[in-house]
Image (cartoon, rainbow, N blue to C red):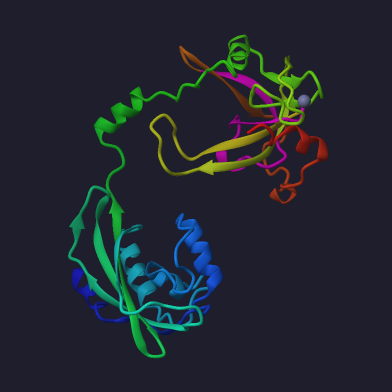
Amino acid sequence: MYERLRAYEGQAAANSGVGKDPVNEPMIRHWCEAMGDAGSAYPATAPATMLQVWTMGGLSGNAGRTGVYDELFALLEEAGYTSIVATDSEQEYFRPLRPGDRVTFDATIESVSPRKTTKLGTGYFVTTRMDVRVDGEPVGSHRFRILKYAPAAKRSAQSAAAKERAQRPRPVVNRDNAGFWEGVADGKLLIQRCDACRTPRFPWLPGCGSCGSAHWTAFEASGAGAVFSYVVMHHPPFPAFDPPYAVGLIELAEGVRMISNVVGVPYDKVRIGMPVELEFLRVDAELTLPVFRATGDTGAGASDSDSGSESDSNAAAHGKGR
Ligand code: ZN
């Protein structure tokens, strides 16, 4: 295997690639803002560490790629080294880049390490060097290293025991939300409603996001709702949870939304618009949580295409008071 991988050393991963955009002030400004660098000399010159930015192909990729990198990766994947992590990079700068500079680059697979075992698993480090030029003159080089690896066995006996002990996180109960948890203990899902403007709100907050009033009354939700949106969690693993699982954003009949588990339906059958009904899940001796059970047709329901629509009344009832 190593001999086959080593044959890629010195091969070109990109030939005469051309930067998608010339070095330019808007990208420099965005970068500086993202880095929290507000008051520097930029954008007269680009920050040197932006070197790689000017070579990135974006979603549509770069002309100039040779396919060698993909080939090497396919070889590693086939051999079971299916995971990847970027480990480190090194850059050298030969001269500053200025707005208007047009960057070209060549990339070479510089080295493939012998097989190594790390905490993550066993695999190979692949180092790629990118030589960046402007008008044929070298302006910098960028070397980056990834580890392509077969993940270590997920669960030792020890971590299985840790999982056994792992508990769902406890809610943080404070003065502002204590009433909600008292309701849960009582088998009720309580929502606040503003005494001044009647806007319902959830999660519990001391003041109304619509009018600012600090006066409110709690009332019990009917328990009817629908999946407004959802995500399926695959990663990262968290000891008390067993991925994959669906996390739903449930819109209650009262117009507020809350995040909870959708139960009674496989994680990959949860759909936007799916009707759900409140129930209380006793997680352990100290913890009971409101969750939502899918009702009716739990097969192929409403399509995802009706997401994102949001009535005015709902808009008024959520997203406030954060
Ligand atoms: Zn109000």
Q: Residue furthest bottom?
A: 136
To which quarter of the image does residue 97 belong?
bottom left
Q: Nearer the viewer, residue 26 or 77?
A: 26
- Is residue 322 something that shows in the picture? yes
Residue 51 x/y as whole percent: 39, 72
Residue in front for this viewpoint, 132 or 260: 132
Observer-nearest residue: 246 or 179? Answer: 179
Magenta highlight range: 254-282
Quadrant holding ligand 1? top right
Residue at the image position 25 percent from the left and 51 percent from the top: 121
User: Where in the figure is residue 177, as x and y percent of width and height?
Assistant: 59, 19
How far from the left and from the top, in percent, is residue 266?
A: 57, 37
| In magenta stretch: residue 272 | yes
Name the image quarter holding the C terminus.
Answer: top right
Q: Is residue 130 visible?
A: no
Q: Residue at x 44, y 72 (%)?
A: 46
Query: Is residue 63 on the magenta stretch?
Result: no
Residue at 52% across / 18% down in the picture? 173
Residue 300: give x, y in percent of width and height: 68, 44
Q: Quadrant of residue 208?
A: top right
